[in-house]
Amino acid sequence: MEFLRVCMRKNKMEESMGNVEKASRILLKNLLGHKKIIIIAVVLIVVLLTGFNIFAEKKTPGGMEASDNIVAVETETVKLINSFGGLIYKANLNPAEAAAVSSGTSGQVTQISFENGDLVTQGQPLAYLDDKDLQNDLKTAQLDLSKLELSLESAKSDYDIAAQLYAEGACSKTAYEAAMRAYKTSQANVQLKQVDIQDITNSLNDCVVKAPITGEISGKNISVGQYLNRGTVIATVNNNTTIKAEIQLMQEDLSKVAAGQEVILRPDKNAGTEYKGIVESIAASANSQTRVFDCLIRVDNASGSLNSGTFGYIEISSQEKPQTLAVPMKAVAGTGGNYSVFTLDNGTARRISVTIGETSEDMIEITSGLQEGDQLIVTNLNSLQDGDLVTVIGEEK
């Protein structure tokens, strides 16, 4: 029985092997019948593999795929630098005192005695107006005054006599009062004429236009033969011995500036002569439009080397710090206390919120948000978003 079972298993195995062999022959026959399809499939596979290899070769040196979305940028290393030592503000330089030169009367200009840039003293004649008519008026008024004074003497004499007679009872009250009225009328006429003469004299004096203050002439607006009306402005005198420098303080800097504080003025931002100044006043409230605080600084200019109407730079010293992190101002974006920069992180731009401090020229202090050694992106900031891929060009600074 055991032998029979073994024989039966052997027959089944042989039968199975036969079936496999038969199936293989059928499959081979079918494959040979589809030779063209196989060739096409092989060609497609080769094309796909070739394209993949070409794509793989288009890698950047760092392994990053080339893409139109990659932004080329320049970077700088964030470093510690010596403290700025203060604030720098651009200032408008104006004269501490300025006065308009104007005509005190009407008349035709006959002579001019100044030019722009002349240094003049208070009361110095600058221009002359035709005064012939006024001179004639003065002579006539003086003659009239002489006549009125004679009449006054006569009226006074008549009044004195009437008063004495009235006191003695030898003159009526009516006659006495008439003499008194005549005397008072003569007094009034003399006084009125004296006022007329004074007015004419003042007008004659006004025919000589004088400097209202000591200073430098500017804005000349007059010519010989021109007719001036009373009050016409013909020039300006600026007292430049003291200059008022006006700056606009940011709110965050208010605590660093106080009235009476000594500051430095330079005509040039980076170099040049230094002039000492004193903070004269700081506005109590900010400008409603610009949100800054007007600050006036008095600067001695006895040498006359500073020119009003120009610009300068005020340096306000603050407490010295040993070192501070600073970055280019162009790398910082934002306003109103919300500031940020972009740093480089393994080929990716990362937006970092920062807190700023003092400024100096084109640099700005960073009090938080960055660390020494960070790679700061300094170009193409307007093209960047957080997470953008970037490639560094140029030499790292």
Image (tube, grey):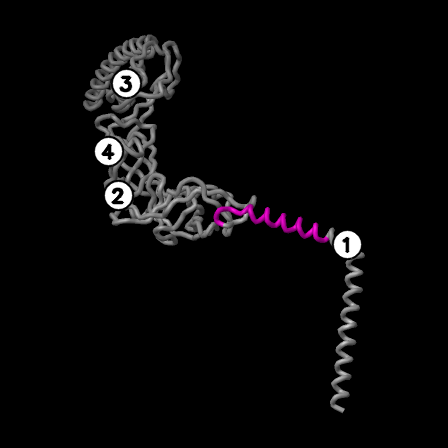
The label on residue 118 is 3
| Circle 4 or circle 1, nearest the eye | 1
| CB atoms of marks 4 and 1 within 8 Å | no
Can you say whether 63 is above or below 119 in the image? Answer: below
191 falls in the magenta region: no
Q: Judging from the image, what secondary structure is the residue with disc 3 in?
A: loop
Secondary structure type for disc 4: strand
Label 4 sits on residue: 275
Question: On the rendered structure, is 189 left or right of 11?
Answer: left
Q: Which quadrant: the C terminus?
A: top left
* Location of mark 2 (residue): 317
Report the magenta residues as a range.
41-62
Residue occupying the far front of the picture:
3
What's the distance in space between the residues labelled 4 and 1, CA to CA?
A: 97 Å
Q: Position of residue 11 (x, y in %)?
A: 78, 80
Which mark is first along the chain, 2 or 1? 1
Q: CA distance from mark 2 to mark 4?
A: 14 Å
The tag earlier along the polypeptide, 4 or 1, is 1
Q: Secondary structure at mark 2?
A: strand
Q: Tell me the quarter of the picture where residue 314 sits.
A: top left
Q: Could you tell me how far apart the alpha carbons at marks 3 and 1 are, in whole angstroms?
A: 109 Å
Q: Which element carries disc 1, helix, strand or loop? A: helix
Determine which residue is flagged by label 1: 35
For disc 4, the neighbor class at 10 Å (few under 14, some 14 to 19, many from 20) is some
Q: Earlier in the sequence, mark 4 or mark 3?
A: 3
Q: Is residue 196 visible?
A: no
